[in-house]
Image (cartoon, rainbow, N blue to C red):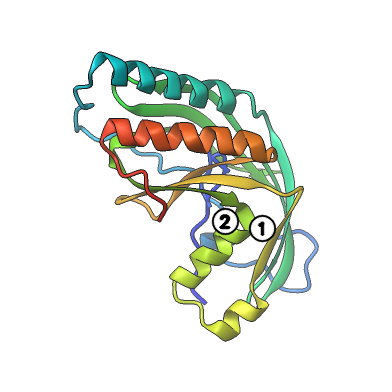
């Protein structure tokens, strides 16, 4: 089965999971680690010209995104994973800080940190241009990764043995872009994920991106 797209808060998030802890199988390749949003500069495309009412709506949506994501704090979680060849357990810590959602440029900036089994693997500044988004999706993380596996060509037999269970359960707001399969933000609070998902959907639409589920 092909490596699945990964996401984090992003898992702010991101995205199976690399650097497995106690496991009966050897660690999977690095492609299986959950990446954050692409660490790339925002598109040079200008933010759209909006009416006063739409500009206020965008500012309000970006304020929700900024406030909610900056309140998440560090997430510590365990992922129990299986595919046709491997079964294992991964321990993660992820932290999103200094997020600024700028309505004037339709861009979200933040700092992303992630560790696997106590080893820091990401410590980067990240930018996402909402005008480049091609779809938005909010759902439980385990369902998202199974959906991604299916879309990437997993066979029905492979899907019978595939799972990624999160402890505690996580919920993801995923954003698809042309530059990367998916970016996203993760939460342990389902209601908070829904609030951010609604705000991201509205902001993407007002910024000229495509907010429909993918």
Relative side of 116 to 203, left or right: right
- For this orientation, the residue located farthest to the bottom is 157
Q: Nearer the viewer, residue 117 or 86?
A: 86
SS at badge 1: loop
Res 21 quadrant in image: bottom right
Q: Position of residue 209 (x, y in %)?
A: 29, 40
Q: Nearer the viewer, residue 60 or 155?
A: 60
- Mark 1 vs mark 2, CA separation in Å: 8 Å
Q: Nearer the viewer, residue 188 or 7?
A: 188
Q: Position of residue 158 (x, y in %)?
A: 58, 81
Q: Where is mark 1, residue-wise? A: 19
Q: Position of residue 185 (x, y in %)?
A: 54, 40
Instruction: Determine which of the numbered discs, if any, sits on residue 89 in the image.
Output: none
Relative side of 177 to 17, left or right: left
- Crowd band around label 1 with a 10 angstrom C-alpha radius: few (<14), some (14–19), many (20+): many
Res 30 quadrant in image: bottom right
The answer, for residue 129, to whether it is visible in the render is no
Q: Where is mark 2, residue-wise? A: 33
């Amino acid at each position: 089965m092909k490596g699945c797209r990964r996401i984090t808060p992003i898992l702010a998030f991101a995205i199976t999971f690399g650097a497995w802890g106690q496991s009966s199988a050897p660690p999977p390749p690095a492609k299986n680690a959950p990446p954050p949003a692409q660490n790339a500069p925002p598109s040079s495309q200008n933010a759209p010209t909006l009416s006063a009412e739409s500009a206020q709506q965008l500012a309000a949506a970006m304020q929700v995104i900024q406030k909610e994501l900056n309140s998440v704090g560090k997430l510590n979680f365990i992922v129990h994973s299986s595919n046709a060849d491997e079964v294992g357990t991964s321990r993660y810590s992820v932290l999103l800080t200094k997020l600024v959602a700028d309505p004037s440029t339709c861009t979200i900036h933040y700092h992303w940190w992630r560790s696997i089994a106590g080893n820091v693997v990401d410590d980067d500044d990240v930018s996402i241009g909402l005008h480049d988004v091609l779809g938005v999706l909010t759902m439980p993380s385990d369902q998202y990764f199974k959906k991604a596996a299916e879309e990437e060509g997993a066979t029905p037999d492979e899907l019978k043995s595939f799972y990624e269970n999160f402890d505690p359960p996580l919920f993801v707001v995923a954003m698809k872009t042309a530059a990367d399969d998916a970016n996203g933000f993760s939460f342990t609070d389902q209601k908070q994920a829904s609030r951010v998902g609604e705000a991201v959907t509205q902001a993407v639409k007002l910024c000229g991106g495509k907010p429909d589920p993918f």
